[in-house]
Image (cartoon, coloured by chain):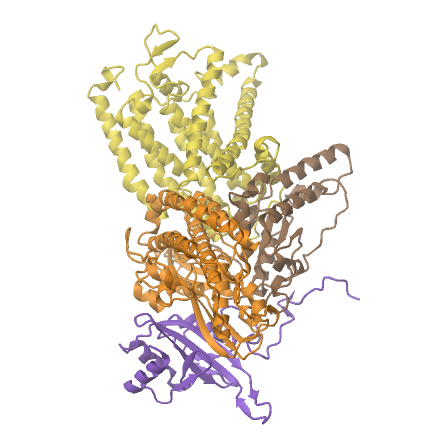
Amino acid sequence: MAATVEARPPDKYVDVRTQELQINMGPQHPATHGVLRVAIWADGEIVTRAEPDIGYLHRCAEKIGESVTHIQYVPYTDRYDYLAAMNNNLGYCLAVEKLAELEIPERAEYVRVIVSELNRIASHLMAIGTYGLDLGAFTPFFYAFREREEILRILEWICGARLTYNFIRIGGVMRDCPEGWLEDITRFLDYFEPRLEEMNELLTHNHIFVNRTANIGVVSLEQAVKYGLTGPNLRGSGMRWDLRRDDPYSIYDRFEFDIPIGTGIKGTVGDCWDRYWVRILEMGESVRIIRQALDQIPDGEIMAKGVRHLAFKCKAGESYQAVENPRGELGYYLISEGGQISYRSRIRAPSFCHLSILEEILPGSMFGDAVAIIGSIDIVLGEVDR
Amino acid sequence: MERLVGALEGLGESAFALSLLMCAGVVLGFVGIWPLFAVWLERKASADFQSRLGPMYVGGFHGWLQTLADGIKLAFKEDLIPAQANRVLFWIAPAVAFCGAFATMVVIPIAQGVEIVNLDIGIFFILAISSVGTIGVVMAGWASNNKWSLYGAVREAAQLVSYEIPIALSLMIPIIAVGNLRLGHIVGFQCAGPEDAGFVYLSHHGWLLFYSPWTLAAGLIYFVASLAECKRAPFDLPEAESELVSGFHTEYSGLRFSFFFLEEYVFMFVVSIVGALVFLGGWQPLPFVSFQFDNPLMKLIGAGILLGKAVFLVWVQIWLRWTLPRLRVDQVMTMGYKYLTPLAMLTLMGMALYQYWGCRYIPGIL
Amino acid sequence: MNTQEILETLNKDGVGQGITLFEGPKDPALVIPADRLVGVCEHLKSAPSLQFDQCILVTGTHMTEIRDKKTKEVTRAEGIEVIYHVRSLRHRALVALKVHLSLEDPRVSSVASIWPAADWHERETYDMVGVVFEGHPNLKRILLPQDWEGFPLRKDYEFPKEYRGISLEVDPPWPQQ
Amino acid sequence: MGLYERNHPDVMMFKLERNLPDMGLLRVADTVINWGRSSSLWPMTFGIACCAIEMMAVGASKFDMDRFGAGAFRATPRQADLMIVAGTVNAKMAEVVKRLYDQMPEPKYVMAMGACTVGGGPYWKHGYNVVKGIDKFVPVDVHVPGCPPRPEAILEGIRFLQRKIMARRVLTRGEHHTPDFTGVSVSPGTTGIQDPQLNTAPAVPTEATS
């Protein structure tokens, strides 16, 4: 702890001053999930201070938001949280639709829910896979990716892209479900549920994994609320808060699903394992939602009437619309003065808020734990830096 | 080697030097070829665990030349030395690390009576020389002038020091039974039979792993500790990729890096073959039924069996690496000092008492 | 609990002086005088009937001048608007607080001590729009490099040509005449 | 950079390179070296944005870049041969990318993956902060367009790079058109944390205990 001894004559005493080691972790580091940079001050293996440095992927999202038309901006939203592009599309489209007062056809709403929940599963798979990678378990990552590829195949089938979909459009969705698509989702869900068990056996209840994550990086509920944590990170700290239930958007109020929270099964409430476990359980809940949506999906139009895509104009006004992204509360705050272009488009990115808690929870942990903690809050740098 | 010297007696005084060179050539050749196979095995095995294919195209059949291509590439890659690194230490560190691993090969008998040096302190020699590699790693970490490397080196030093104890203690346990440090004698003990035994016979003691509960425990302790000695997962902290970028060899490139690479795989082989010799009966294929391995053909078969056992143990190491997450550094220490070392001491004591109270006088009993 | 009710509660608690209700076409907001922001925010957080414990978003917007097309009267003065979105998890309510600042000297007290989540949001607002948050523990650029010039989200921002020797301009893919 | 010495004298290899006459045996040696280099392109674990996810997908089960010998992702630039610049490079990141490129030992290859690295991509017009194409500061061997490119496209890029390497001369004299970017300097500077020790040369670990 940087115990500085008063300077003494060097010929009589051995100088035993110790010094904190300053380490620069990132932007190119295997465990930073992109281009996050964390400056770490460490006393041996113990982290004494940490300072995240972001902005290495700043891509001018908000400037572009006020420079291009609403329709043109939808593809950009894909690229902010590129692991959950559908959810981002949904958030932005809902925000614009709220301003434009559009009525969305039933079928489009159901397709939106199905694709967003599929994408949520894909995103959580990625989160737990890379989390395993952070802790040195390589194989779960590949298994997660194998399952994720199946989801990508389904999404690719309906919209032609693997990662950046631009599928949910203002006023509805891009196109109707292809023949056999809905049945294929059912097939996938039947395949996927046992795989979740496999993942639990391989990683979740692995003794080493539990030892590495339980009681590590504990975020108390008070801290979580203070630092604006949302999504699985807030739920991992024991708060039953989900915008899908607490501020329902789209048609989420029609589905029955549980909101899993961290209960400290393996350690303390709000530790890394709880956050991880919430994600695993949420995938199961998403499967439930998709199954219900597949049962209920009606026939009909997929695009609202009267949306002229080439000259889509919004009414003047300002509105904040939040959706439950896989990572937390994704909000779009739009100020429109009428016309095709927003006056201001502000994005509330969940990962941005989550990162700010690192300064609070990293100190005192060991170096290996620091990696585990950064992995457990599941950040996407595209969203942090925008 | 003595026999080789004898065979080359006609050459006069240079016979010793020549046989030395030949032995060195054999060891080096093996050390050069083994990693080619081991790395390929590791890549293919890991691919299999991860539902991938692994190298497929290089060299045609299932990428069997993949490692050779890697080697050529590494050999012809620029050799960077960071400007602020300690040049001398940086230069010799890989060599020291590598020597530590491959010098142990000289005492390993590959078949009955086929070894380079039949050293009377065989196991001690292996334990002592294999620790030299650690010095190389620490030198590399220190000389690189990189904080990640330094972390890796310090972790390596701490880990190796703590795991030397259980590994040495667990090797003492079979020695209590055998009463000899020569590796050849240890195998001989495991296939000792009646004087007038035929080609196939029931051995008195069987494999040392099944000799007594204490040796079984010792075998397991040895395996776990040897994982830590080879820096293999779940103890791969010195080069923990997601934490320390590449650990102690972060600054190494090209050929020098490949030396660390070779060292790791050669050392994996060494601990595996020692395990096979000491606990798994060496070249004896079955636990309690022994064969006479005295003619050259049988010796060749025996060598094949021994290599097979060693490769199997290496494969188990690979299997564990691609399955388990990594331990944290304090957990590694806890494991070493709180569990493995006391356990090894307890086992040692148990074995000593077991031997003392008569079990050694009842031949053939477990 | 909607914005109107929150304003009534604030008035009832005696901290509502100067706060007006902004009623746009969509979301309403509370317009708070810049010098009273911290007091109101503290009350919003601590009062048991309010308990706005989570700061969701801090937005800075450069509002350009708008004149009526016919009368040429200024209907909206040029300035910077800082909008705080605050959520009460207990009461499931979301409220937007607006502060109007001048463009020349956009200064407002920081609320990072009340809601630590606002820390990074305020830094970003400073980075993008140039609002100075007084009393902020660590006010410096967060997304852009420290030596970046200008505030990109101002409407009059001009894109830089290069940064530290790297051109930020587009090379046209076609040969230039 | 001044931090890392290039072409150190004890690397005889680089003295020999491209200076030997065009002889049959040396041409064979060239082929063998090129074969080794092209069959073992170790990429660096270095993802920036969306493309990084596709890069990971290429390494993962379905596509498996390891089939071509290019699957051994190395975390340190010192051991990597191929830098896949996967994602938008902005002004703050450019310095880091250039530095990583400088840290890689020769021979090194760069793949510009995705529209952003090829020419700014969707950010070419309003991205005040985005470098429109990484070939402004590092030499690029393969451009793989797409936003993000499909994994098949990356595999094709790898195959393309392998063919390109096979056509090179290593020891013998031959035509070379390697762009020289040594003059392009991205001045290293503080980008976030104002701490000289973190941003410039790594501190000598011995100084504290000496």
Question: Is residue D45 placed above or below C154 in the rendered structure?
Answer: above
Residue B58 vertical placement versus A40 (above, below): above
Vertical comparison of A98 with A16: above or below = below
**Residue found 72% across the figure and 33% down from its top:** D28
Give percent across and percent down for residue B15: 56, 17
- Look at chain D in the picture and name its colour: brown
Q: Indicate the colour of chain B.
A: yellow
Residue C90, given in percent of the width and then of the height, sits at 30, 70
Chain given the colour orange: A
Residue D193 in view of the camera: no
Q: Nearer the viewer, residue C23 or A272?
A: C23
* Residue B360 located left or right of residue B47: left
Question: Depth check: C58 or D12 in front?
Answer: C58
Residue B356 vs A74, above or below: the answer is above
* Residue nearer the viewer, B173 or B180: B173
Which image quadrant for residue A23?
A: bottom left
Image coordinates of residue B231 in percent, x first then y, are: 42, 40
Is B5 situated left or right of C116 in this image?
right
| Observer-nearest of A17 and A15 | A17
Could you tell whether C28 is left or right of A211 in the image? right
Left or right of residue D149: residue A143: left
Extreme residue toward the front, this view: A299
For this orientation, the residue located farthest to the right is C177
Q: Residue C85: give x, y in percent of width and height.
A: 41, 75
Count the labels in the image.
0
Q: Quadrant of the N terminus of chain D?
A: bottom right
Residue farthest top in this picture: B196
